[in-house]
Amino acid sequence: MSKTTVSAPANIAFIKYWGARDLARALPMNPSISMTLKACVSRCTVEVTGADHDEVWLSEPDGGFTHPGADFVRRVVEQLDHLRAWSGRGEHFRVATRNTFPSSAGLASSASGFSALTLATVGALGKTATTPPAELSRLARRSGSGSAARSVLGGYVGWPAGTLDEAAEEEGSYAVQLAPASHWDLRDVIAVVETGAKTVSSRDGHRRAATSPYYERRLELLPGRLDVVRRALAAADLTLLGPTLEEEAIDLHLIAMSSHPPIFYWSPGTLEVLRTVRELRQEGLAAWATMDAGANVHVICDPAAEPAVAERLESLPAVGFVIRDGVGDGPVYETGHLF
Ligand code: DP6
């Protein structure tokens, strides 16, 4: 039992998790595939205390601590409850967390945050060495942020939808590494056009997805797209991956916009970036765009194209700043702590 600090990265999905069979347990309607990032990281320190309640803090860059919002505290404590039930232990925890990137701006802060929380809590309980990666992924998924199941692994990660057998699904729905980061050096230039919290959570998006008249069609098209992405990953072929990557992102937003009630995650800056990415391709650069449930655009490109892509996106008036990220090796257990 010891204080444990984990830095866990965000991930960007090439094939998106959108729509759940069981939202509380984050059992997805469809398989997803993502790339784990390295610069966009959540850092979390967890310590077992003798208190009768959990303490949750946001760690500030200046070393200070603030109280997070009630909703965030509730989600963290719920995940700590899951981990208490899993470990058969009743102790409470002190938790501090910090992101290296804007929270709740469609940059998967929940995925990195809940992955870091889960790994650090398992560590604080002294169970890291005896818990296999599949179990860590399943535990992270149980936070309700399904994409956290993918962030416990590095490189390229697949999360199967699972079977229709409820019991097997609960045990079996976890992410697996498809290829290590060293397999393919892909970059993600993130054009940040909005830093505020999104107005509709991914959770509400999942809930509404099936109300879109196009959702069934999306599910029909996904096996073909998954096949393309798997082949592109195996061959490290960006010209094969790119068009499907972009089509899939547009499809996610098409479902969101045609849900009842509709969800519009895009801002005018999103369209400006999408247009610029098409222009960059016309100029011969291999770059394709994808977005999660937010306005910001992830531009996936190879290392040779990255400087030109970043420079062009930075020059756009609608782009506040650019984060130059890329595929990474996954979570790191840190020796320094947040408290
Ligand atoms: C659009 O339920 O994992 O990012 O809890 O906000 O991270 P958060 O969302 P989650 O859904 C992820 C939705 C997505 C697509 C994806 O990452 O697969």
Image (tube, grey):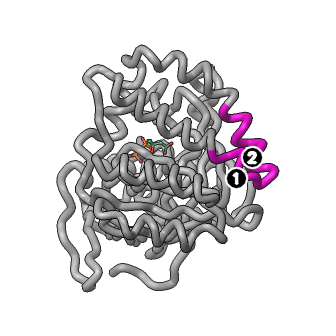
- Residue 14 image position (x, y, % from top left): 58, 45
> Left or right of 184: which side holds 31?
left
Specify the label residue 238 is tagged with.
1
The amino acid type found where label 1 is placed reads Leu
Q: Nearer the viewer, residue 71 or 50?
A: 71
In the image, residue 258 above or below residue 90: above
Label 1 crowd (10 A; few <14 / some 14-19 / many >=20): many
Q: Which of the two labelled residues, at mark 2 and mark 1, occupies the earlier sequence position?
A: 2
Query: What residue is shown with label 2?
Result: 232
| Location of residue 22 (image quadrant) | top left
Asked if residue 147 shows in the view, the reply is yes
- Residue 338 image position (x, y, % from top left): 36, 79
Which stretch appears magenta?
225-242
Asked if residue 108 shows in the view, the reply is no
Question: Dot 2: what SS?
Answer: helix
In the image, residue 116 above or below residue 202: below
The stretch drawn in magenta includes residue 209: no
Residue ID at (51%, 32%): 27
| Ligand 1, image quadrant it occupies | top left
- Residue 147 image position (x, y, % from top left): 50, 46
